[in-house]
Image: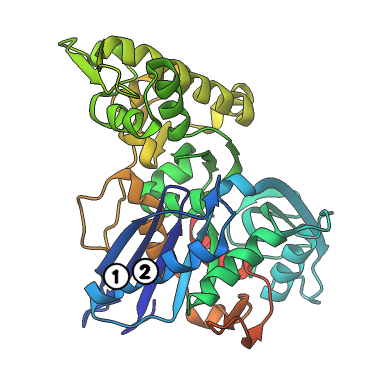
Amino acid sequence: MFEGGLVVALDIGTSRIRAAIGEYDEQSKLCLAGMASVASKGLRRGVIVNIESLIKLISKVVEEAEHQAGRTVEELWVSQSAYILEGLNSRGVVAVRSKDREIRKIDVDRVMEVARAIALPMDRKILHVIPQHFVVDDQPGIKDPLDMVAVRLGAEVHVVTAPEAALDNCLKAVNRSGFAVRAMVMDSLAASCSVLTHEEMDMGVLMLDIGSSSTGWILFQGGAPWKSGHIPLGGDQVSKDLSIVLKTPQESAEEIKCESGCCWEDLIEMDEPVIVPGVGGNKPIHVTQRELAMIISARIREMFQLIRDDMDLGRNIYRLSAGLVITGGGANLRGIAQLAGSVFDLPVRIGNPLAPTVENKDLGPEWSVLMGLVQYGDQQNPLDLTDIRRQKVGISGNKTAKKEGGMASAILNWLKEFV
């Protein structure tokens, strides 16, 4: 915890860019001092396509948060879209070197290095290496192997990789906005910090983060991520479907979806008509809420079925004792929990940010990544952040300082509490 300091988060999404500033009070309690949100430009499916537009928006949203908080910030915890990330599991085994065969921190560091030594394409790099559990000789499921006696030490980890160019472009955009990157964090991993409880992570839970252009998912068991992935469908696809079927602009379809949309017909008590604006001078038309629900539910059901297949639910359902949690902007769609329950056959809840250290109880699920980044930064130990890649670039684009290293250890130190 950074006593007397700030924790500043930046959530770069396809539809919105959000920033939040957390500040510690005299009791070392983290309070939300300022937050801001602007419409996003310069990204498509989580990938930067116009860096100049993104730079201006990052500057704008952080300045608005600074004005609200009355503070000036320098470093940001930045989200990375799960759409460009890939997760896989790896393992490593080393011999315990000490004469008394007692496992020390150097042994843990060595086995983690072995576990992360995976073959990667030239254009990808490791973003996270998260320990799942350790194996002491032939005994698996060890959470903390330090000071135990053994001949061999093994580790099973979840590795998240990212395109190096995408990380560099994001880093460049933040730096040219006048800020340094403290760490980059997978958005669904960040969301889990504010949405999931320790009990859910330990029992086993599947979290879906439904964004505008993609849906990231992450499966926790034993307190650590066990599997993660994404599908290229999100809330925008539902709006596009409505736009095509109703023959109306996508902006109007988005508004209709948010105001009158539902994906579970049993929740529709009065099938009132919905006005659909005409195009090119044509008269508006009327559709019923049930007709809207048929269009919306078909796409949402397809999304859930794709996730079922992607995560191999049949083989992993035994890992999900705590059920399913849905968060992200798509979680605001009425009836989505009921539809998910019917597809996954699991208990489902909507994941609003659970932020006990942040004094804001009324935020919707669309804020889960941002609030998760704030809590993530809160739980980091500044003494363990020496190897985070940090680079400061002037507004002109000239490098003023640069320090290279792995980004994984900061995330590891925080997640060890859940392993």
Q: Which residue is mark 2?
A: 60
Tell me if 96 is positioned left or right of 71 in this view.
Answer: right
Q: Residue furthest bottom?
A: 400
Q: Residue furthest front?
A: 281
Hey, which quadrant is residue 341 in on the image?
top left
Where residue 6 sits: x, y (%)? 35, 78
Q: CA distance from mark 1 to mark 2?
A: 6 Å
Task: Look at 41% across and 71% down and name the residue there.
Answer: 59
The amino acid pointed to by label 1 is Glu
Q: Relative to residue 356, is residue 204 drawn left or right?
A: right
- Residue 274: numbered disc: none
What x and y, as percent, mark residue 226?
60, 43
| Identity, as a three-letter code, of the amino acid under mark 2 | Lys
* Residue that carries the numbered disc 1 in the rendered image: 64
SS for callout 1: helix
Could you tell me residue 287's position as x and y percent?
Answer: 27, 11
Which residue does the image show at 58% across and 35% down from the upper left? 232
The quadrant of the picture occupied by the C terminus is bottom right
At 59% across and 45% down in the image, what residue appears?
Answer: 83
* Above or below, comparing residue 85 to residue 31 in the picture: above
In percent of the image, x 25 and y 73: which residue is there?
29
Q: Is residue 131 left or right of residue 201?
A: right
**Left-right relation of 55 to 357:** right
